[in-house]
Amino acid sequence: MARFELKLPKMGESVAEATITNWLKAVGDRIEMDEAVLEIATDKVDSEVPSEVAGILVEQLFGKDDLVQVGQTIAIIETDGVVTAASATIETPAAIEVAPVSVILKTTESVKDYVAAPTPAASQDFSNSDKFFSPLVKNIAKEEGISLAQLESISGSGNEGRVTKNDLLDYIANRSKVVEATPSVVSNSAAAAPVPVATVQAAPQTPAASPEPQPFNPAPKAVPVSINGQDEIIEMDRMRKLISGYMVASLQTSAHVQSFIEVDVTTIWDWREKNKNAFEKREGEKLTFTPIFMEIVAKALKDFPMMNIAVDGDYIIKKKNINLGMAAALPNGNLIVPVIKNADQLNLLGMAKAVNDLGNRAKAGKLKPDDTQGGTYTVTNVGTFGSVFGTPIINQPQVGILALGAIRKVPAVIETPEGDFIGIRKKMFLSHSYDHRVVDGALGGSFVKRVAEYMEAFDENKSF
């Protein structure tokens, strides 16, 4: 039978690992080529891993919530013939297995050395069980001296109640309060020597010698209770938990301060109104304010390279590339920040295409893991929801984030050679949050002022 190793695929240069969030196929299931086998998640993006071959899934090497490195084998698929789950067990050459030894130190003196003298564990036979156990679970159980009765007593959290690797490891960690000592292979003479420690407990050698199995049920998480019986209790989804952690960590890491400035964007407003239809007809892209503002921010970052930095402990990393993060709200209410790479090298058309592409794929849930990596500065448009301005939290390890407020028609004093007069102008607030550990007020204020100057000096004859 041909065996295919399904590996975690490369998801971008800056993505090295992912968490398994759900197995879409169980052991024994038939899989077609390009059919999704499992779901994975990086820090911010969920995606599926398809199979490169057709066959039967015979082994899952990782469980739900396990962290897997890119390139690691995550499943085994049998590609020749139909293989049932029961026959999917992998036969390995016979080998000497060393039973683990639990050592209890009952002395107040420092213990510098001890010699563990384990004996080979009896080979466990799990074939008589009515339950299915993956080869990985069986191997761990054999190495840890777990009997069939003990293994069957574990409450599984996998598909159809199957025992996963994590279930078994939790059971092993909780079955005894003793300190686990890693065994080592010793010579016969060393094995005969006494153990110079207070007490040694050897693991059971045969199923008959095993203690009476105790059902293992992981301690349930405390769930809030509605006091009046009418409140709805909703658990955060995975992404919201991640966002929550990031926001708290950022506030605990950076010394957040803000600078605010009001800017007249009448020229930009009028230019877009005049050109948006022609732009869409010629380029097939909608022209929003976002690419115009992003182009200006990238230009200002070139003028102030010390805003395009990251902090790593006591070191400042000055970034060569300007990669603009673009905060986007998802349909489920969560937030994601796709990144426009090398934003300073894009003209308005290129910026519009990048903004529209990332925005559309974000809403459709089709962003790739690498799309959210490598940002050096972030822009968020709080004006989309009617906010005049905001105080955004820095996207670590960056040192600044710019919030764009809503564009409003307001009365303003207009200065002309003939004198001042009152007129209706389109204005907005820029809110710049920056890390006061490394960005002083002069730099933080000067940067946002430069952004405002570029906006107000926008060329009304600009071509696209």
Image: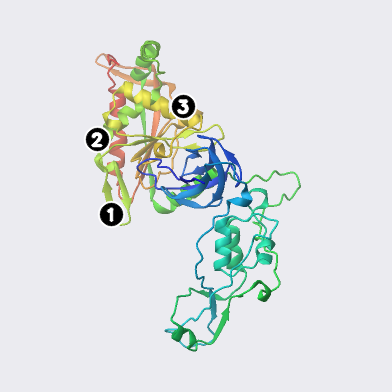
Camera-side residue of 374 and 46: 46
Q: Which comes before the other along the chain, label 2 or label 1?
A: 2
Q: Residue 464 appears at what percent x and percent y?
A: 30, 16
Q: Secondary structure at mark 2?
A: helix
Q: Which comes before the other along the chain, label 3 or label 1?
A: 1
Q: Which residue is mark 2?
A: 302
Q: Nearer the viewer, mark 3 or mark 1?
A: 3
Q: Amino acid at mark 1?
A: Tyr
Q: Amino acid at mark 2?
A: Lys
* Residue in view at x 34 percent, y 39 percent: 377
Camera-side residue of 454 and 83: 83
Q: Residue 17 appears at what percent x and percent y?
A: 43, 48
Image mark for residue 315: 1
Camera-side residue of 146 and 188: 188
Number of numbered markers: 3
* Residue in view at x 56 percent, y 56 percent: 135
